[in-house]
Image: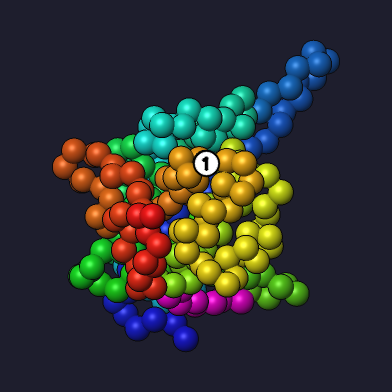
């Protein structure tokens, strides 16, 4: 069932930027010179971006939305320079900077009320995580992202699945216990996409099984130690995979409070935190 208005849809806009631009790129071969160039039609990219956002708003039933973008600076790289190091050398789509500026300044033209957000030192996921965990928001919020990392945030998640040429709309509610377990699972498995190694040999299935009987921070630490690593290694991985919550970010200074076991607040009341 679609949420009753007015709900605010928190949109991870980064993938939409890439998808829209890549779809508007075209290779051109110059006759008799063996020269090829790559061009992008930003007008077409804008139309694609507008259509994608409008579809999300329509399918979700939300009347408000926030387009969340990543800053060029990332607080995670300050303590882990290797973070996303596997993406070095990979090109951004043609016209990316100008297109992102347009999306943030002019945004989408539709009937819903929207805003664009980019906060210093944060990724779009963190902006969504902070807003999604605000204690008393003016409007209830719904999270949309194709990134699995946001499964670490409790709340209503809006997802789209395409199957047999049909579009299926899903609304999933993640409890604090479920989202916390997802976080612990990532502490073990890491995230190869972002160059976070985690524990060798621990994919999602093995990590989930390791937490089956006791989904606690103590289990994570003991698993690291039994694998020949340290609690400090576990904490560093946790700080990388943790999506920021409302009280993790100072909006006036742009400073981030790094994750630590002592201030993790969850409904599961994990008594092993701070061990």
Give the main secondary structure of the magenta stretch: strand
Instruction: Say above or below: 273 vs 29.
Output: below
Residue lying at 33% horizontally and 44% vertically, measured from the top left: 258
> Any magenta on residue 206?
no
Inspect this view and state whether residue 143 appears.
no
Label 1: which secondary element: loop
Q: Residue furthest bottom?
A: 1
Q: How many marks?
A: 1
Residue 109 found in image quarter: bottom left
What segment carries the magenta color? 168-175
- The C terminus sits in image quarter: bottom left
Residue lying at 68% horizontally and 75% vertically, measured from the top left: 166
**Foreground residue, 226 or 256?**
226
**Foreground residue, 191 or 53?**
191
On the image, the x and y values in percent for residue 92 come to: 56, 32
**Foreground residue, 108 or 175?**
175
Q: Is residue 93 left or right of residue 66?
A: right
> Any magenta on residue 172?
yes
Residue lying at 44% horizontally and 82% vertically, measured from the top left: 2
On the image, the x and y values in percent for residue 171 come to: 49, 77
Q: Which residue is mark 1?
A: 230
On the image, the x and y values in percent for residue 34 come to: 81, 16
Residue lying at 71% horizontally and 49% vertically, measured from the top left: 201
**Foreground residue, 37 or 241?**
241
Within 10 Å of disc 1 (Cα), the crowding (few <14, some 14-19, many 20+) is some
């Amino acid at each position: 069932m679609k949420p009753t208005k007015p709900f605010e849809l928190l949109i991870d806009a980064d993938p939409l930027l890439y998808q829209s631009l890549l779809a508007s790129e075209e290779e051109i071969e110059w006759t008799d010179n063996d020269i090829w160039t790559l061009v992008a039609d930003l007008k077409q990219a804008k139309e694609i971006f507008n259509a994608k956002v409008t579809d999300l708003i329509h399918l979700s039933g939300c009347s408000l939305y926030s387009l969340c973008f990543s800053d060029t600076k990332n607080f995670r790289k300050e303590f882990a320079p290797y973070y996303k190091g596997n993406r070095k050398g990979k090109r951004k789509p043609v016209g990316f900077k100008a297109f992102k500026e347009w999306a943030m300044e002019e945004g989408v033209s539709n009937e819903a009320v929207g805003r664009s957000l980019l906060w210093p030192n944060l990724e779009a996921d963190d902006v969504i995580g902070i807003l999604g965990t605000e204690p008393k928001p003016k409007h209830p919020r719904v999270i949309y992202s194709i990134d699995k990392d946001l499964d670490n945030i409790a709340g209503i998640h809006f997802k789209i699945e395409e199957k047999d040429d049909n579009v299926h709309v899903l609304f999933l509610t993640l409890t604090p216990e479920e989202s916390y377990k997802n976080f612990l699972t990532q502490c073990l498995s890491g995230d190869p996409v972002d160059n976070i190694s985690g524990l060798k040999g621990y994919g999602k299935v093995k990590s989930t099984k390791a937490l089956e009987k006791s989904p606690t921070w103590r289990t994570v630490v003991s698993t690291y130690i039994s694998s020949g690593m340290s609690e400090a290694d576990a904490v560093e991985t946790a700080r990388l995979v943790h999506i920021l919550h409302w009280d993790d970010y100072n909006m006036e200074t742009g400073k981030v409070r790094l994750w630590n076991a002592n201030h993790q607040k969850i409904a599961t009341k994990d008594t092993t935190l701070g061990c």
